[in-house]
Amino acid sequence: MTSAPLIHTCRSSPEGALVNAYLVETRAGVVAVDSLLTVSDSCALRRNVEHLGKPLLAVLLTHSHPDHYGGLTELVADDDVPILATQGVHDVISRDDPVKEQILRPMFGDEWPEKRTFPNTTVKDGESVTFDGVTFTVIDLGPSESPHDNPWLLTDDAKAVFLGDQIYGHMHCYLADGFFEEWLENIAMLRSRLSSDAVLYIGHGGPAGTADWDWQRGYVETFLEAIRSTDWSDRGRARQAVIARMKAYLPGEELQFLMELSIDPVAEKLGLVSAGPVAEHGS
């Protein structure tokens, strides 16, 4: 192969929330971007590394949601490699993992990994790391789609970007963490910062291009408008109205459960209903 890295997309099963992880194949090794959610999918991801016949050099994490870090133990196996993220992503994963265990164990049973591995190497905004001659640069967004997000640029030209969940590939989205205003701000910032012909490797679906920024902004804004314009005197009817509005925007059903999990927390965040238990997810 040439010296240019090859990017392999590894997508989970539908049962694993259609998550993408990426294997960047260099001349002599492999750098993984994110893991997957379930044990089965993450073991398959590890087999993909072994099929390439090159050592795993590092893992880069894009954000703090458990479908992107949950299978790190299965991915890394016995390899002693750096698992890199910003301090914010590291701290959120460490803080929230016990809660994720309580939520995801009943949902996934033994498919939710018993042992989770966390980032072991932190990086700062704009810091670059190089493995086998291939350079990655991190962007620390802070709260965005998740409580903390840090996409990665591949090489200096920034034409390949591992974006995490800043864009969903025309699938329903998760907004229950409540940082939707920050997410919209980051969409504007990233769109202006990244090359217009960049290839965006995203966490669900894709790859995406710059036109998908409009779709993603529209989805978030439509969801917020649907929440705000709904009569919440009947909570069940209000939920159905929001679902219907989002299905009009995106008729497909892929990851619809994430959107539904987001309705009550966002309505509470906006002060439209009384606060209750916040829905969590694996995305």
Image (cartoon, rainbow, N blue to C red):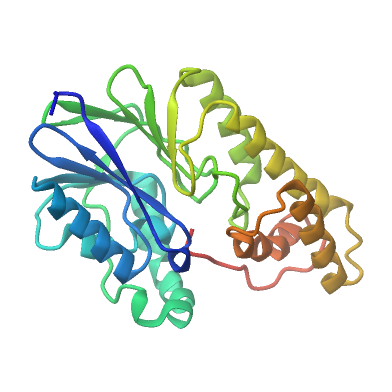
**Which one is in front, 181 or 206?**
206
Residue 261 versus residue 51 in the image, above or below: below
Residue located at (69% from left, 72% from top): 276
Count of numbered labels shown in the rendering: 0
Q: Say which quarter of the image contains residue 158.
A: top left
Q: Say which quarter of the image contains residue 159.
A: top left
Q: Position of residue 13 (x, y in %)?
A: 41, 63
* Left or right of 212, for residue 148: left
Q: Position of residue 114 (x, y in %)?
A: 29, 77
Residue located at (88% from left, 65% from top): 232
**Which one is in front, 253 or 108?**
253
Residue located at (65% from left, 31% from top): 214
Q: Say which quarter of the image contains residue 273.
A: bottom right
**Which one is in front, 169 or 266?**
169
Residue 58 versus residue 67 in the image, above or below: above
Q: Position of residue 52 (x, y in %)?
A: 14, 47
Tell me, yes or no, if residue 169 can be seen here.
yes
**Which one is in front, 102 or 283?**
283
Q: Quadrant of the N terminus?
A: top left
Q: Position of residue 33 (x, y in %)?
A: 30, 45
Tell me, yes or no, if residue 73 can be seen here.
no
